[in-house]
Every structure is written in C-alpha cells, then in structure tokens.
Image (tube, grey):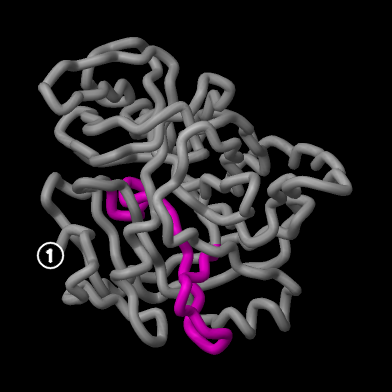
Amino acid sequence: MKRSLVSSLAAALFGAAALAGIAASPAAAQPQQAPQAKGPKTPTFEGTVALSNCSGSVVKLKGSKPGDPALVLSNGHCLQDGFLEPGEVVAGKKTSRDFTLLNADGSDAGTLHSDKIAYATMTDTDISLYETTSSYREIKKKYGIRALKLDPRHPRQNRDITVVSGYWKETFSCGIDGFAHRLKEADWIWKDSIRYTMDCQTKGGTSGSPVVDDRTGKVVGVNNTHNEDGEECTLNNPCEVDENGKVTVRYLNAYGQQTYLVTPCFGRGNQLDLDNPYCELPKP
C-alpha cells in the first residue's frame, strides 16, 4: 500500500492524512476564545506545525534541556515514504523535511527543518518523532515559540481535550470517552488507544495533531484515525477489539494514540534510547 497525494488512491489513512483536492487551501485559523480568569486556558496553536500532508507539534520531554535538538511529533503514517508495514520500526533514519511552525493565533511563524527521523512506527501505536536542526532555545529566541510539553502520565478518562491541527489551523474540542484495548484498522493494530467523545469530528489533515489535556495544557496523545463509513476493521474504518476478542464498530468515532510511552525511550540530549528497561515502544 502506498500513499499518493495526487490521486484518489491517496484516501486519508485512518480518516486523517490530508488529500490534495480536499480543499484549495487549508481553512483559516479559528478564533481562539479568551481564557477565563480561573480554570484551564484554551489551547492555542503555539508550537504546532503543518506538514505537507498532516499536522504535528514541537514537543519537549520531561528531561529535555533548552539546548537539545527540538523534536516534532506526528504520526507514523505521515512519513513521506508512505505507510510502514506492521512490525516495521524506523530509528535514526536520515531524511529532509520542513515544517511550518505556527504562532498562537495560527499565523505562520517560520520554517523548521529536520534531517533525521528519530523514531517512527505503526505497530502498537502510530507515531513519528523528527529531530530538527534547531534547539528549543533557538526556536524560542528566533520565533518566540515555546514547545508543548509531553505528559509522562497515562491520560485520564472524562478529561476535556483539544485536538489542535496545524495543517487546517483548526481545533476540535471534546473529552476522553475511554480507551480501546486494541484498535484494528486493516493490517494495523494499536494498543490502549484514546477514544474521543463524538464532539471531535476530525478530518483528513488532522493526523499527527497533538491531543492536549485542557486542564494541564500538556500533550497526552497524537490524533490518528476516524471511522468514516461504519465498516468493520477496514482502511479508514477502525474497530475496537476487547480483551475477549469481541469486535465493536463505532461509526464516526475518532481516536488518538497515547504519548506518555515516549518519555522513557529518550535520554540525555533528546537521543533515542530503546534499551532503557522502561521503554515499551517497539524496537527495530
């Protein structure tokens, strides 16, 4: 299976990857609500990025330092070379990719460049992390943009979340409805996926968007799929499989993959460390 953005065969994987022809250009940024005097702030576009076909965000891990190379989080199915096979893991692969960095209001702040895919897979989860050629300090100094923080903890059910799409410059607000033991789509299976409430009707191009916990402002997941047609376990139509093997189809439900698993897999200098005994991400 190979993704093409210039033909009908480029149907957005998992209801998420963007199609050339969905629209002439991404939608204009949605106006942000003014934060209330008390309570959580409304997530903005600060630190999010637009890829050529997906969304993403500049993220900082618990142990990241200002001088470390900044990481960009997106989906494994958003790689330029197409979908990864089940069981396939990419680590430390040379690449060349640019990302459009956004300001809080959704306007373009500048361009970030990556020359390495630090990690990517579509097995157990659907995630990619690019190492950029800029440090967090350099990004802050040049653009005034702060990275989003990854929450090292498992996300919580019933928490309000916002999916922030840099591609569309649009936000989707809903809650965490629960977690799918296994989420199956075509040949791919993901573990403990985040199931959104129905308020988040994501679309092509929102793949890779950070899922932000509204209360903490931290990233708890990465958006990746949506059951478009009500079909069972087919491409663009994920199904849930419980501990006993029972299959459930939730028409129009959208899902994300948890990101707390990333933190133990990166060590000093934001360098990948899959040998850490606490790292549970699939290995090459």
Q: Does the magenta run of residues contain 171?
A: no
Q: Residue at the location (73% across, 50% down)? A: 106
10 Å crowding of disc 1: few (<14), some (14-19), many (20+): few
Identified by mark 1, the residue type is Pro
**Height in image: 242 above or below 1?**
above
Task: Pinpoint residue 197: horizontal percent, then vertical percent.
Answer: 51, 24
The N terminus - image quarter: top left
Count of numbered circles on the image:
1
**Height in image: 2 above or below 52?**
above
**Height in image: 229 above or below 62?**
above
In this picture, residue 136 sits left or right of residue 221: right
The C terminus - image quarter: bottom left
> Residue 10, can we see it?
no
**Residue 186 position by quadrant:** top left
Residue holding disc 1: 284
Q: Residue at the location (47% across, 72% down)? A: 62
Task: Pinpoint residue 146: horizontal percent, then vertical percent.
Answer: 67, 70
Q: Residue at the location (37% across, 20% down)? A: 227
Magenta region:
58-82
